Amino acid sequence: MSLPRVSLPASLPRPRLRHLRRAVRRVTRRTVDLSHPARSPLGSAVENCVVFEEGVRRARDCSAAEALERVRKGGDRSFLWIGLHEPQQSELDELAELFGLHPLAVAGAGGPHRRPRLTRYDDTLFAVFKTVRFVEHEELTATSEIVDTGELVVFTGPDFVITVRNGRSGSLGPIREALENDPEQLALGPAAVLHAIADQVVDEYEAVADAVQDDIDTVETAVFSAEAAKVDPGRIYQLKRELVELRRAVAPLDRPLLALTDPLRPMPPVPHELQPYFRDVADHLARTVEQITTYDGLLDSILQAHLAQVTVAQNEDMRKITSWAAIIAVPTLGCGIWGMNFDFMPETHWTWGYPLAVVLMAAACFAVHRSFRRNGWL
């Protein structure tokens, strides 16, 4: 379910390599088709209502009640998949009554949640996934949107799967098409759909994390360049904010996915055949969480390095200003002494007094300037 891996030559310059990576992502991005031949008349939020028997989709326009009746007459290897996009609470309540969903799971399923989670209610699993999408941009600024998040709610029962999408990302069209091309996997039941969704979500996490690395490389290169003092720290803060949003979507899923792989405490309706697949998804998720944590630490180091470089640059500027002020103080001292209005001043009536004073002041300024240059202040 992951995007095709494209190896790029390491010898390319960073800007060209970055643009080439983004071009590859645009070309290899999946095409999403939200249309489906089996539409349910349940409501406008329903994207599809499909019955699967022995891993094969049975295309038929019917209501959710009719589809559920057919599934329960079809045997153990039949189940129903209903997909909704931003439904009204009344539509969720109708499905909850039909499928016997727990009120706590249904309450607020159509609205945003605080964090991803997976909860068991009797023989039904209630899962909340945060979907992410990388927002393409030519240049990182202090206001660039990098990560766009959505939400995907999945109710998984013994003979049904109900998916609720909130937000622009997280389309299930490609997942459904891939599963329909693999009847053996789909014959494992509703848990196979839950695995495919989790796998797709985690793949998107990995793709977004890899894309964010390009922006981190850009900021790192700018901070350690000759123009480091001119780098806007707002770009680093914005990148850290977007990384925090990504981590909030990814990190909370670690424990729930591991719970699905525990052979001593199996969670219905996840069969033993699918536990290794969920374990593989959990491994990919753990690697992505470590990657995001590494990025956050790297951005902290980049920010500290940038602030240190700015401080050093300011100290150098202050040393130069102080050095020139000391040089100017030498002739100012001489002019101040000989400019006092006293009658008996030495050499005030001497013909060569003025040229000698100018030469002495210039020589003193030259000596002070040379001393500062030797010490690295100028």
Image: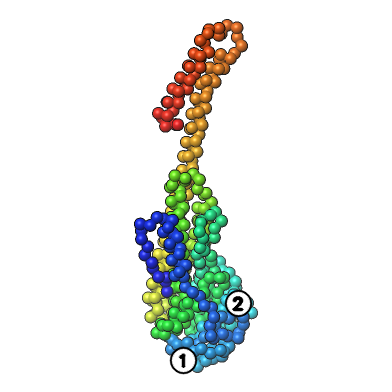
What is the secondary structure assignment of the residue under circle 1? loop
Q: Is residue 308 placed above or below 154 in the rendered structure? A: above
Q: Which mark is residue 87?
A: 2
Task: Report the number of numbered marks.
Answer: 2
Residue shown at 53% from the left, 51% from the top: 234
Specify whether residue 57 is in view: yes
Q: Is residue 365 placed above or below 105 in the rendered structure? A: above
The C terminus - image quarter: top left
Residue shown at 43% from the left, 47% from the top: 224
Pick the residue in front: 81 or 367.
367
Dot 1: within a 10 Å radius of its alpha carbon, few (fewer than 14), some, or many (20 or more) residues?
A: few
When asked about the image quadrant of residue 23, the answer is bottom left
Name the residue carrying label 1: 75
The N terminus - image quarter: bottom left
Earlier residue among tags 2 and 1: 1
Instruction: Spot the residue most to the bottom.
Output: 73
Residue shown at 43% from the left, 62% from the top: 20
Residue 53 % position (x, y): 46, 89
What is the secondary structure assignment of the residue under circle 2? loop
Dot 2: within a 10 Å radius of its alpha carbon, few (fewer than 14), some, or many (20 or more) residues?
A: some
Q: Amino acid at mark 1?
A: Gly
Q: Is residue 331 placed above or below 59 in the rendered structure? A: above
* Mark 2 and mark 1: Cα distance apart in space: 30 Å
Q: Which mark is residue 15?
A: none
Q: Can you tell which of label 2 and label 1 is closer to the viewer? A: 2
Residue 359 % position (x, y): 48, 17
